[in-house]
Image: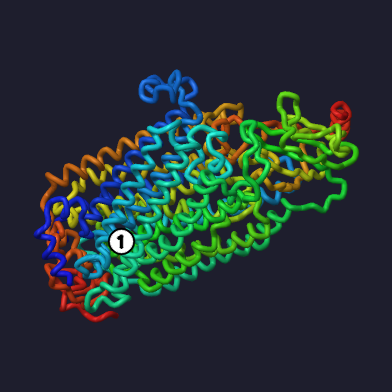
Amino acid sequence: MNSSRAGNNSRRGFLQIYVFSTSHKVVGLQYFFLSLFAVVVGMVLSWIMRIHVAWGAGGISGFENIFGLNAPGGVLTPEYYLSLLTLHGTIMIFFVLTTAPQNAFGSYFLPLQIGAEETAFPVLNMLSFWATLIALGVLLSTLFIGDGPPISGWTAYPPLSAVGRDAGPGLAAGQNFWIISLGIFCIGAMMSALNFIVTFIDMRCKGMSLIRVPLTCWAWFITAILILLSFAVLLAAAILLLLDRNAGTSFFVPANLLVSGKIEPHAGGSPLLWQHLFWFFGHPEVYIAILPGFGIISHLIACFARKPILGYKVILGCMLAIGFLSFIVWGHHMFVSGMNPFSGFLFSIPTIIISLPSTIITLLWLGTLWGGRLQFSTAMMFCLGFISTFITGGLSGVLLAHPAIDSYLHATYFVVGHFHMVMGVSAIFAIFAATYFWFPKMFGRMMSERLGAIHFGLTFLGVYCIFLPMHVLGMEGSPRRYAMLTDDFLQSTVGMHRFITIAALATGAVQLVFLFNLFWSMFKGRKAGANPWNATSLEWSVSSPAPLMSFKGELPVVYCGPYEYGDTTEEQDFVMQSDSAGRQDR
Amino acid sequence: MPEAIGLCVHSSMGKFFSAVLAAITLASVALFLSRHWMPSAAAKHAPILDAQLHWTLIDAGVIFLIAQFALAAFVWKFRWRSDRKTKIFPAGVRIAIIIAIVFIGIELFSAATLGRRAWASMYDRSASDSLQVEAMGQQFAYYFRYPGADNKFGPVHTDKIDASIGNYFGLDRANDDASKDDVVSAELVLPENRAIDLFLTAQDVIHSFYVRELRVQQDMVPGMRIPVHFTPTRAGKYEVVCTQLCGLGHYRMRAYVRVVPEAEFENWMRAHSR
């Protein structure tokens, strides 16, 4: 079946092979470049916001030329600041953190690593990418329609997001487009997730038993289940919100709202219902962003420590536990929402318990490093950076898990620092590690390790300079999502905000080194061999870049587990999974 | 040694990482310890909340130090050398699980003891002479109302809300007896050392009531009437800020709470009574 499908490929034109392609590798690359575009946009948005927060009160020369009426006198209007904030959050969460680790690397490497020629549903794979691209287009179109993108943040709490233009700019057409974009994204994400699940279960090659599957594939599989279950709920919630806005229903809007002097024609809805539905999606989403990272880090540190990963089955069990627990902790986003305090206390318990599997995994990574022969490739450096920032972000999360503590720190910069440390840094570090590691397989050339070292060193230092001070800002009680620092108290934090902004701009500038390295290496990098890292999993058994027909119709047979490093023959310190000399599982 | 890696296996990158990580770790701890970052508290339930926060911060800080230094030390010690053989560490799995269980066990224990008491202290309604106040959030201001001598809040008529005549709550003083003596104010004035039952509502979208010094943060949700309970213990003027994104003026939505001695409060109330 596979060979006939691939045979058709060769008779297809450029468009079918490279644009409307059903090849998992092309789809993976398309997702990769979509995320790359999205992350650049998202980062530029954050620069604008940071500059505005730190120096905006007096006006920024140049802002008026760029933003026109949205920045009279060079001062961003508060509504435009909130529009950018909404776009930044939405782009980063959905089009970077969901797509890059899962869809970009998963689409490309899940079939390769389990020894399949294709995913189970190649057309579904293609459709999921195009849905995601359309969703991104719809989202960005809000910049150019009506009065701009919505100002309700990426969480879009009703009634603010439900009652239209009365509540503020961007809440008419902009909010509708935002919801439609999200809906399309959900459909794309679910199609891809379904494909991943079936591919993982059905398409493993001979010998690839469940305990020989690389942890990356396990992570993509578990994440796919989370996506399928949680994005379905978000899609439903988005449809209900769209109905509230456009069809006169009242799922989320209570009676007797007086907005801008007008009594809203709604009755009987519950604003908290949206929060429950949203966070029922929203908390698994955190793990959707980070679980592929767990897989990637586990996979890579075994390779670069030249040791088997410590506790393969325990890590697997922990990832499954995280996947399950992530569905029963959503209420910790709502400790001060007006939910019953008993519920708050109840939700704090699984929230604390979910840090158990995360802690175990982190310690197992440290145990894998112990006694290794660590090779400090750039990919490995980003893994080490991941572990460090994940420890930091995880520990600040422990504070927020307690409802009483959260009631002081909730909605302050402490929370901003916390989730950026985990999702904005750790998850992005996993993407960087994966990029440096798999670049040779994706593009057939090596990235510059020298530039990589510079990129890592400065980025690692930079992210701590950006996000640690945010924690103390939160301890002081600085609320997040403020367009300006107006009052006396917040004026005293301007110095700290300026430091953060300088660090953010500098760290952002360092990313140009990465972009240069990426595109330069694509064309000018040293040619890569089939297995430049002496790694074991199946993608390294095919030539670089991976050919359109990965295994040329001859599916591999697997003889051993994915982490056979260290104690083998004189000539080489690893056994590839497809190497028939490989021993049986220990 | 894999030829392709070239430069990267040189141990300098590992040493650099260890040194930078150690420096970052120490700087982070120093940043947290450099000042008392939280504004000093002015509410009865605050000490236990602050105690839990500080205890958890110390707990997390110690683990932060140990974990980051372990990472730095492992990276330094086990950097690539051609003569080094790898060692596996099978007992590490059990050790990792035990450490994690101990750590999470401590957190659960603290949640069940200190945490439970701290959380419960914020919902303490036991005071019999508590002062009833209502706070209403709207884009982008707060208004407060006291029930007056009858101790009853008059009913709200949304269609009668008219800011131009100061009727922020939509009271019908002509027809509703309970509304007649309601005192409405843009400033929240509270007596020192008396329990407060503050009922939070919102007129249009979700807002929030956050007073740093009183250690109170609670969303104000339209359609709901959410009580918060606290006892201010220190006279002073504190800022009430909105912490729930409520529209373009979110950043400037604030009011002040003035905590005054009981006698001064009585005077203020008399002056504002109708």
| Image quarter hosting the C terminus of chain B | top right
Q: Is residue B259 visible?
A: no
Q: Chain of mark 1?
A: A
Residue pictured at 37% horizontal, 53% vertical: A98
Q: Secondary structure at mark 1?
A: helix
Q: Which residue lies under the disc numbered 1?
A: A301
Between A54 and B69, the residue placed more toward the observer is A54
Looking at the image, residue A67 sits to the left or right of residue A412; the answer is left
Q: Is residue A124 visible?
A: yes
On the image, the x and y values in percent for residue A160 come to 56, 40
Between A227 and A191, the residue placed more toward the observer is A191
| Image quarter hosting the N terminus of chain B | bottom left
Residue B267: name its quadrant: top right
The residue most toward the front is: A247
Q: Amino acid at mark 1?
A: Ile
Looking at the image, residue A45 sits to the left or right of residue B135; the answer is left
The residue most toward the left is: A11
Looking at the image, residue B113 sits to the left or right of residue A361; the answer is right
Residue pictured at 34% horizontal, 68% vertical: A197
Position of residue A401 relative to residue B259, above or below, is below
On the image, the x and y values in percent for residue A461 come to 37, 42
Residue pictured at 16% horizontal, 62% vertical: A531
On the image, the x and y values in percent for residue B57 come to 57, 51
Position of residue A64 relative to residue A103, above or below, is above
On the image, the x and y values in percent for residue B17 come to 33, 49
